[in-house]
Structures are given as C-alpha cells and as structure tokens.
Amino acid sequence: MKVVILAGGFGTRISEESYLKPKPLIEIGEKPILWHIMKIYSHYGFNDFIICAGYKSNLIKDYFYKLQMYENDVTFNYVNKFNMEIHENNNKSNPWNVTVVDTGLNTMTGGRIKRIKDYIGEDEEFMLTYGDGVANVNINELIKAHKSSGKIVTVTAIIPVGRFGVMKVENNLVKEFKEKVSAEDSWISGGFFIANKKIFDYLEEDSTVLEQYPLKTLAKENELGVYKHTGFWQPMDTLKEKEYLEELWFNKNAPWKLWE
C-alpha cells in the first residue's frame, strides 16, 4: 500500500524557518519532520511513498537525491578523475521508494491528491497524511479498522487540542465535520487517513480543499469511517511546537519514535 504525504504548503505559521525551506524539511533532531513521518510508516513495513510537493519542491527533490549520501559514509576521490563512493550501512539506510510529484504552488490539499491519481494503482487503497505532524498511531490497527468498515475513507481521530475543527463520531462513523468546537464535541482529525480510489470522485480541481467538500460529503454519505487514537499526536505548525518536538527528541522521550 502506498503512502501519500501532503508536503506542498507554504508553512506560513512557522515562517521563521519556512521562508528558507518547505515545512516538511524543517528539522527535528537534525532530521526533517518528513523523515520522521516516513520512519513511522516504514516501521510497519510501508516503504512506497508519494510526496505531494509544491512550495520549494526542488528542495524536497534535492533532499531525496542526496539522502543516501547524507545517511552513509562517503569517500570522495579527487585523484585523477573525480569519483564518489557511498559506503552503505544497512543500519542507516532506508528501503524506500519515493516519488516526488510537483503538485503546484497554490494547489489545495484535495487538488494535490487529485494530481497523484495516476501514481495509485487500479483499485488500490492508499494511506494519506500531512507532512507536518507525528504520532504513535498503530498503522496496523488503522488498516484493520478501515477494512472492517468498508468505507471509502477512514480518518484517525484524536483528542482535541483546542483550535482545530472537530468531528462528530457515532458508531465508528464520522457523522459530521465542524469548524467550531462545542462542549459536546470530543474528537478532531489527526490525519493518518486510508482511502480507496473512490475518493478521487470527490476531488474536482486544484482549488479543492480535502477538509471541506470531500470529507464533509463523505461524512453525510456515511462513507467516512474513523479510527480512534488516544496516544501521542502533535502537529508542527509553529516554532513553539517545533521546539517542543525537539525537546522530546533530544531527551530521548519521543513517543513517535517506534523504530530502533
């Protein structure tokens, strides 16, 4: 199953760093948060990634082009004709297949997904997440919940943290998507979706926002299943949140680090 990662936004709320690089390349413990997200999926055996790039997409392509060099020892031989040899260390290398797709500078989330349709196999389900948040979501349990629901999309629901829109959940189905939090609401979308190819029927053009018409319509049609995650989840929207994640990482207390 492929993993689609939305990595094309401007990251304006963390502009202290995003003016230099796309938000998914902002580092947590000397590794881009995109790397951390991919390691979560890789821990569960999912290593085929499609990166929906946009803002400064060339830097994301450059990162993956040089990743083997970054993660292994390298010999640069300048004698006579220049030669570079990468000494691959299996403990460091990742068995990843990565497709970076330039999905447009101003394209919205749903439009970005629409643009990678041809990279998803016929009748194939795929996982989907945002390139700016980490969690210790049990991917195997998420898949199990999705398959048992038989719905077009399954979304991971997490405990709300105040400023996000919320979902009304009944009988393991998302019944309604709301922008505002009210006293009786208790769950928000944490990303970490699974979808089948029918989702493309709900995505119209570059201006389509996944969190608006597509998800709200799926909820009304009882086609938006839910997997409840009560563990760790943290986005990196601001510099303060980045610093919090770095503190957890450097103190060896990062709950999302599921890998050895």
Image: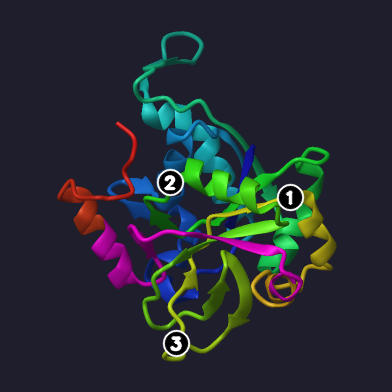
Is 187 part of what is drawn in magenta? no
Residue at the limit of the structure toward the left, as seen here: 251
Q: Bounds of the magenta span? A: 218-245
Residue 204 in the figure: left or right of residue 8: right
> Residue 63, position in %: x, y?
50, 41
Labelled pair 3, 1 in contact (Cβ < 8 Å):
no
- Label 3 vs label 1, nearer the camera: 3
Q: Distance between the residues labelled 3 and 2?
A: 27 Å
Sequence-first tag of 3 and 2? 2
> Residue 6, position in %: x, y?
59, 57
- Label 3 vs label 2, nearer the camera: 3
Crowdedness near tag 1: few (<14), some (14–19) or many (≥20) residues, C-alpha within 10 Å:
some
Could you tell me the amino acid type at mark 1? Asn
Residue at the limit of the structure toward the front, as seen here: 171
Q: Distance between the residues labelled 3 and 1?
A: 31 Å
Q: Nearer the viewer, residue 166 or 2?
A: 166
Per the image, label 3 sits on a secondary structure element best described as: loop
Residue 19 in the figure: left or right of residue 205: left
Read off the residue under disc 3: 184
Of the numbered discs in the image, which one, if any, rests on residue 138? 2
Per the image, label 1 sits on a secondary structure element best described as: loop
Could you tell me the amino acid type at mark 2? Asn
Read off the residue under disc 1: 196
Please indicate, yes or no, whether residue 21 appears anywhere in the rendered image.
no
Its colouring scheme is rainbow
Q: How far apart are marks 1 and 2 (CA)?
A: 19 Å
